[in-house]
Amino acid sequence: MKKLRPIAALGVTPIVEASYPEPFKARMGSFQCRLLGDAFGLTQFGANLEILAPGAQSALRHWHSLSDEFVYVLEGELVLRTDDGEMPLSAGMCVGFKAGAPNGHHFVNRSATEARFLVVGTRVAGDVASYPDDDIMWCHGAAGSYVAHKDGAPYEVWSASEQVKP
């Protein structure tokens, strides 16, 4: 068995390009996502360190059918956008999103400085991420994930090798 070793979170290679197909990818802005849970081979939940540059957003506004999400703001200021409106979040604040609750959410950095936050979410086969504002859905299966239009037609220009995070 491999010996357990703590790591520096900022030492994990960041993902710096959104995995959405166009025209959605261009809307994300400059961000970094470090898949911390993957660095340890975790399979039951993901833990990501995300860094949003000014003007960037964490994702398209979405909700999950089967997976819970928890977000803790480490540094900076974010705006949480949900069906209920906009709410400011700052360092030390947290929010959770229960699986199956159809309240689309995402985070936007409208400040002049970077914002850092930790995202923890369950990994449940069969989960579907729904996007109330956009013609897209993200389906997570045991064999992998894919994105499609809301009518189920696949996005032709997107490949599974580009998958990063919903």
Image: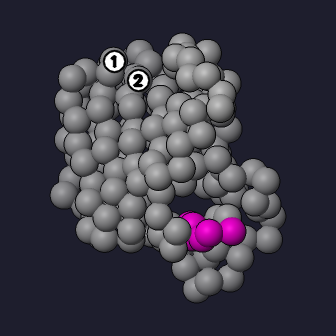
Image vertical order of residue 97 relative to residue 131, above or below = above
All told, the count of numbered labels is 2
| Residue 73 in sight in this render | yes
Amino acid at the residue labelled 2: Arg
Relative image position of residue 36 (x, y in whole percent): 53, 31
Amino acid at the residue labelled 1: Glu
- The image's mark for residue 104 is none
Q: Please identify the quadrant where the C terminus is shown.
A: bottom right
- The image's mark for residue 75 is 1
- Give the residue at mark 2: 116
Question: Dot 2 surroundings within 10 Å: few (below 14), some, or many (20 or more)?
Answer: many
* Left-right relation of 157 to 30: right
Asked which secondary structure carries label 2, the reply is strand
* Left-right relation of 124 to 77: right
User: Start and end of the magenta stretch?
Assistant: 136-143
Q: Nearer the viewer, residue 125 or 139?
A: 125
Image vertical order of residue 21 relative to residue 147, above or below = above
Majority secondary structure in the magenta region? strand
Image vertical order of residue 145 relative to residue 48, above or below = below
* Left-right relation of 29 to 75: right
- Residue placed at 69% from the left, 53% from the top? 163
**Contact (CB < 8 A) between labels 2 and 1?**
yes
Badge 2 or badge 1: first in the primary sequence: 1
Relative image position of residue 84 (x, y in whole percent): 19, 58
Q: Please identify the quadrant where the N terminus is shown.
A: top right
Asked which secondary structure carries label 1, the reply is strand
